[in-house]
Image (cartoon, helix red, strand yellow):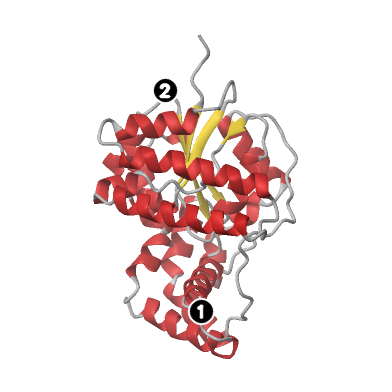
């Protein structure tokens, strides 16, 4: 009987390279990831909103079908795969009996002898430590990857993503980003704060997941041969070429005003301090002189 595959959960952080890693692993011959990057299963299960997730999938399917019918799909076969995967997953979410067993069957269906299956839902980083422990027992080998990015850069990218969804005009975009940024620093956007709280997320992972089953990687390091090799070794995969210059979900380019950058660096100092103490501060990150002296 063949050995079950390793189950991978990538628990964020938001705007820290999860899409790049997903694309890389989807192209690896020893992994199997469905066309839905973020299943959002366990966070919705715990919140009792699986049916809401199913309704969203239904809308996504309708949008993809409309794209095909209008002849706007650049890669029709890929769109058809996405439609099929979403329809199948929607059935899992609406199942009244053993939905978690159905979720695992969905992840592994079609994997064959490939070594790794999994998904990348940043919201899993907000699960409690006991819940992470539960998820780590779903299969014989469950591994967690947590991606971090320079806190200032991550926050500004997250803010731009949220503003883009409100569809302001081009002339209003920069001002809307600044307003959203002020909202975050005022404590009025806790979801943004929580998803960039490396200390809290890694703390939960440390309490809920065994040390050898969790890996923290900086986005800036990930996009290097050594960073890719670190992830593949952790997952038990062979070397595979990576497109290190590929940029995904870059977002609308808006320079961060110096005044906002200075405020962000001050506000995010605890995150820099945590990373410096726990992992060592990456050279590529924004840093404070006192942190540099500590690391040295």
Which class describes the residues within 10 Å of circle 2: few (<14), some (14-19), or many (20+)? few
Tell me the distance, in whole angstroms, between the alpha carbons under discs 1 and 2: 45 Å
Q: In the rendering, which numbered label is found on residue 140?
A: 2
| Res. 295 image quadrant | bottom right
* Residue 236 image point, x, y percent: 59, 28
* Residue 239 image point, x, y percent: 71, 33
User: Horizontally, is 22 left or right of 146 in the view?
Assistant: right
Residue at 74%, 49% in the rendered image: 243
In front of the other: 54 or 8: 54
* Residue 136 image point, x, y percent: 37, 33
Residue at 51%, 16% in the rendered image: 3
Q: Which residue is mark 1?
A: 167
Q: How many marks?
A: 2
Position above or below: 164 against 68: below
* Residue 82 image point, x, y percent: 55, 46
Which class describes the residues within 10 Å of circle 1: few (<14), some (14-19), or many (20+)? few
The label nearer to you, 1 versus 2, is 1
Quadrant of the snapshot with the C terminus? bottom right
User: Horizontally, is 139 left or right of 157 in the view?
Assistant: left
Question: Which comes before the other along the chain, label 1 or label 2?
Answer: 2
Position above or below: 85 against 71: above
Q: Is residue 136 visible?
A: no
Q: In the rendering, which numbered label is found on residue 222?
A: none
In front of the other: 79 or 34: 79
Residue at 41%, 66% in the rendered image: 270
Outermost residue on the top side: it is 1
Helix, strand or loop at label 2? It is: loop
């Amino acid at each position: 009987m063949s050995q079950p595959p390793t189950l991978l959960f990538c628990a964020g952080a938001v705007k820290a390279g999860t899409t790049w890693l997903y694309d890389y692993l989807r192209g690896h011959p020893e992994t199997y990831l469905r066309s839905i990057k973020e299943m959002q299963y366990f966070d919705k299960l715990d919140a009792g909103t699986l049916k809401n997730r199913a309704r969203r999938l239904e809308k996504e399917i309708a949008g993809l079908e409309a794209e095909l019918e209008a002849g706007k799909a650049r890669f029709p076969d890929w769109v058809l795969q996405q439609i099929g995967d979403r329809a199948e997953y929607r059935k899992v979410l609406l199942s009244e009996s053993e939905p978690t067993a159905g979720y695992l069957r969905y992840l592994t269906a079609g994997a064959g002898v490939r070594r790794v299956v999994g998904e990348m839902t940043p919201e899993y980083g907000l699960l409690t430590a006991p819940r992470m422990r539960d998820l780590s027992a779903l299969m014989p080998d469950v591994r967690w990857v947590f991606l971090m990015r320079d806190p200032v850069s991550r926050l500004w990218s997250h803010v731009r993503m949220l503003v883009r969804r409100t569809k302001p005009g081009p002339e209003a975009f920069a001002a809307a980003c600044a307003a959203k940024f002020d909202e975050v620093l005022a404590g009025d956007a806790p979801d943004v704060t929580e998803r960039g709280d490396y200390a809290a997320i890694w703390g939960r992972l440390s309490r809920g997941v065994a040390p050898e089953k969790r890996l923290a990687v900086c986005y800036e390091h990930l996009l290097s041969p050594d960073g890719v090799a670190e992830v593949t070794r952790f997952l038990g995969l062979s070397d595979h070429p990576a497109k290190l210059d590929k940029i995904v979900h870059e977002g609308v380019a808006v320079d961060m005003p110096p005044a906002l950058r200075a405020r962000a660096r001050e506000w995010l100092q605890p995150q820099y301090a945590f990373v410096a103490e726990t992992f060592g501060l990456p050279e590529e990150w924004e840093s404070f002189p006192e942190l540099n002296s500590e690391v040295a």
